[in-house]
Amino acid sequence: MTIGKHRLGAAGGKTLDVFNPATGEIIASVPRGGVEDVDKAVKAARAALNGEWSSMSPVDRQRVMLKIADLIEANGEELAQLETLNNGKSVMLSRLIEVGASADYMRYMAGWATKIEGSTIDISVSVPPGTKYNAYTRKEPVGVVGAITPWNFPLNMAVWKIAPALACGCTVVIKPAEETPLTTVRLVELCLEAGLPEGVVNVVTGTGEEAGAALTAHPDVDKLAFTGSTEVGKRIGIQAMRDMKRVTLELGGKAPMIMFDDMDLDQLGIAAGVGVFFNSGQTCCAGTRVYAQKGVYEKVCEIMAQVTQSLPIGSGLDPANQINPMVSAKHQAHVSACIAGGIAQGATPLLDTSPYAGAGYFVRPQIFTNVNRDMAIMQEEVFGPVFTITPFEDPEDAVRMANDTKYGLGASIWSTNINTVNRYVPRIKAGTVWVNTHNLPDQNMPFGGYKQSGIGREHGRSALDNYLETKSVCIALG
């Protein structure tokens, strides 16, 4: 762990094993931090907030952030290989997303550091009569941020939390997922190397039940930022409400892809490869519920099955492999159980149902037809290479089915008719609706969910509001 400027083991001396999902082998161990370690890290973050960091000018914060981005790129291949070894994903995705997009996002947020501003206000009150006032607002850092990140995009999600916090002048204690801590540990080392004052960013590794719970409940944490499951997010939200901590939650999803008769069928490869199987389906916006209008339904089933069967399965260290391992043995068992549950409930699998033979935490992709809304695979997040295809005739039925889950993170509409697109985009209850593409967030486009997919937005100007307090100032003029 890094607390202040020191690299430390856990106070209790415990460690956690870290695995390579492609082989199931232990590749490292990290400290299993707990209450005492979290307390040290929060105190370091508070001291930094009240010390050198608070007096640093916005342009100096920007310079340090730009240096961090440079170091992410300079150490890019190390970070990419480390991510793939630890997470299992394709090294191509590690290079493009974990490294490339993370460096870009750090630079994007660095630009905002010098552009945070309040506003002047004309006020109507006049007490006593004839008194004039000068009023304005100030934007101030919310304070110490407790950030808890998921295992599916470990480095990228860490930067999503750290970068806007730094731009706003906050300090951070980050707790990475216990399965995938290695690139976050390295990132915090690079932050210090870039000249970030000690204590501004600290990392405590450990389990959610121990380190995560301690960080969530710590009384000197001002704001919580969490990406992960809806179940855990609810517990964090309840704790935040008890303490009146500021909180943002980016949670689960069950994204629909609505395909109309007039869609371009040549785009079905993109729909499958990017919309469903991006990161082997381990994404919260994966388009796991396909609704195809009857005129194209048979073709959608045929082509998407062909595309899925053609995707090579294997280690992410070979970029040719497009279906990589699940992150852990536990998650492999979960996805396998979801497939078995779909079959048991009467859904029809289109592909081979035999388990993957060999080492590692692999799951064969699966497509289901003959599904209904009451099946678990239609309502619950699988988070793996599994999706369903359902026919519809009336677009109103497609909209109703698309909105018929507790989630609302992402969705997509596939049509060549601009009137169809404009008619139904406002009807979809999701934080992002893509058209003729899917699963493509951008650093300048607010990202977050409706319903039980979360609270707040990341990316763009909207992300800064999560890390700032607004102070009104009113001055009586003599």
Image (cartoon, rainbow, N blue to C red):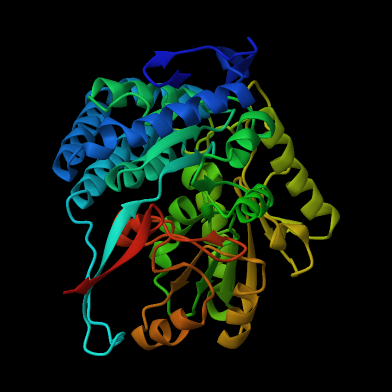
Quarter of image, res 155: top left
Quarter of image, res 49: top left
Q: 240 or 343: which is nearer to us?
A: 240
Q: 371 or 28: which is nearer to us?
A: 28
Classify the position of the C terminus by image quarter.
Answer: bottom left
Q: Is residue 18 above or below residue 383?
A: above
Q: Return the x and y of residue 372 as percentages of the image width and height.
A: 75, 69
428 relative to 45 in the view: left or right: right
Counting the numbered discs, the total is: 0
Q: Return the x and y of residue 113 as percentages of the image width and height.
A: 22, 48
Q: Residue furthest right?
A: 344
Q: Is residue 81 visible?
A: yes
Q: Return the x and y of residue 164 as percentages of the image width and height.
A: 33, 47
Q: Return the x and y of residue 289 as percentages of the image width and height.
A: 60, 63
Q: Residue furthest top?
A: 13
Q: Is residue 354 visible?
A: no
Q: Is residue 448 above or below residue 76?
A: below
Quarter of image, res 255: bottom right
Q: Residue at x 48, y 22 (%)?
A: 85
322 relative to 478 in the view: left or right: right
Q: 166 or 188: which is nearer to us?
A: 166
120 relative to 458 in the view: left or right: left
Q: 314 or 167: which is nearer to us?
A: 167
Q: Residue at x 47, y 34 (%)?
A: 174
476 relative to 92 in the view: left or right: left
Q: Residue at x 74, y 48 (%)?
A: 338
